[in-house]
Amino acid sequence: MKDRFDIAAALREIAGLLRIKGENPFKTQAYERGASALENLEGDLDALVKAGRLTEITGIGSALAAIIEEFYHSGECWMLQQLRQELPPGAVELSAVPGLSLKKIIALHDALHIESVAELKSACQEGLLGKVKGFGPKSQAKLLADIEKLETPKDGALLLNHALEEAERILKHLRAGPELIEADLAGALRRRKETVRRISIVAASDQPRPVLDHWLRFPALVRTDKLDDEHCLARLAGGLQAELVIVPPDQYVAALHARTGSRKHLAKLQAIAHSNAHVLDSATPSTSDGSERSIKSESEIYQRLGLQYIAPELREDEGEVEAARAGTLPHPLTLEDLHGMTHCHTVYSDGRNSIEEMALAAEAMGMAYLTITDHSPSAYYARGVEIDRLRAQWDEIARVQERVKIKLLKGTESDILANGSLDYPDHILEQFDVIIASIHARHKMDADQMTQRLLRALTLPFFKIWGHPLGRLIQSRPPFACRMEEVLDAVAVSKCAIEVNGDPRRLDLEPRWIRAARERAIKFIVSTDAHSIGGLGNLPFGVSTARRGWLTGGEVLNTLGADNFIAAVHP
């Protein structure tokens, strides 16, 4: 009989093998979701299996339930055994090396019996890959470099959206305990950093031991690293650290504040407090008559220091303390400020949902307008929209508009080509309501080439929005090289705005460059880069990134109503 973590690991292996085979991604994701569901299961797996009720677990259907039952009873699974037989040994491990396709893995196994990354590294170092068809000196050198990158210790960080999902599950679990009074996220997660190494939670309770006991029963908690009467540092099933600090209710606000800001931010506050003879984050400051009272809000902490309130996303020591002291810290954008959903894809390119489905979903979220911005022809891998299909799309937008209240804008995410031109002729571009201009290929140009490419595109004589500006994919692709200050100077005097992309894998433009653009009075949009109805949920991540860059509502074009937005962005 296997426990739920063993079964979850097997499901993840199945997902990995299916992915290598090139199976439908929805199928592989189903196994990943099933694994996650088991890791976070709060019920009794034994009872669910024996009662035939596995399908009551969210994310587990009848087919997946049958596989779980087979694992549970026999410790084996026919499907996993079949996949292992179909693929070379070590295929999952070897597939982690960039560019190593299944065909190449099979060739390496057949010629050199390579079954692990370590064996592949040795073969590269010994120059043996030249014996394998399809491999030469350059590909061998690249493989060796990629392997060395894989061997570099990882920081264990999780993307913001995944960390938030895990954190919300923990909070839901904690809040089910009757002894808990309140709890919230702290640390990097509360500041909405792009990646998170540790989930930090501050809780208030007069009974810390029962709260800790309930915390230790969280289903995905697999190891305790530190534990005392009011604190626990633990490890979750996916490897992420999770920390709980429990304080008396009258110390809760002070503790939450002390565990939210960066060390440098808190050090500056401490210096101001010292100069004013205050004790930073004292839970019970004295009143004018000498009595003590608890701090009711974080705003009070900043007020006592003579500062404007500093929102959690800004607490990084990037000049926010000085600005708050001078009274010049801007009031950052909120989700409620936005009226339009921008940068959305449909089935006309690589989106999963129709125009009408996207429109109805955005309308249900309270949006006043939606931009349909599918890929342009050069994005062949994303079924970029050729001109003949573009006419059909515009006709469909017009038909859907008659059935929905939300205003639909016909747009494009047009590729910025290598020479800096855009991917439709001018007579087509001028017919769009909105143009997002983005780079999707040739990211490895040198800084001079990329700068010239961007300068030509962004200074074209019609309005455009610079999409996911520096092309980064967090944890997998760094921003491309360019002379950013020079590009921002050009944008500032051109018909151009900049996107803050809410896709959690991008969150591009990063905050330091947002602040640099603000200094030049450049306008922005905050987008979802949604490729599905679910992708519309990226908007809060775009907002949090905008807040980290100090953006205000007045600097973001999609805070405007539909008519004013159209007037502002029309080519």
Image (cartoon, rainbow, N blue to C red):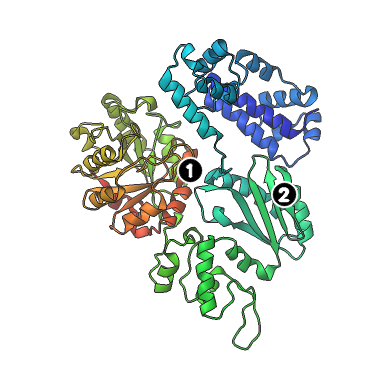
Can you tell which quarter of the image residue 231 is in? bottom right
Q: x, y percentage for residue 152? A: 54, 37
- For the residues marked 2 and 1, what is the alpha-carbon distance in whole angstroms? 29 Å
Q: Amino acid at mark 2?
A: Asp
What residue lies at 58% left-to-right and 17% top-to-bottom?
Answer: 114
Q: Is residue 465 left or right of residue 165?
A: left
Q: Which is more toward the observer, 512 or 51? A: 512
Q: Amino acid at mark 1?
A: Pro
Say whether residue 394 is visible: yes
Q: Is residue 347 left or right of residue 113?
A: left
Q: x, y percentage for residue 158? A: 56, 43
**Which quadrant would the C terminus be assigned to in this image?**
top left
Q: Which is more toward the observer, 162 or 151? A: 151
For marks 2 and 1, the one nearer the N-term is 2
Crowding around mark 1 (Cα neighbors within 10 Å: few <14, some 14 to 19, many 20+) is many
Above-or-below relation of 394 to 276: above
Crowding around mark 2 (Cα neighbors within 10 Å: few <14, some 14 to 19, many 20+) is few
Q: Is residue 284 left or right of residue 553?
A: right
Residue identified by numbered label 1: 504
Q: Which is more toward the observer, 197 or 18? A: 197
Residue identified by numbered label 2: 225
Q: x, y percentage for residue 192? A: 51, 52
What residue lies at 34% left-to-right and 59% top-to-bottom?
Answer: 554
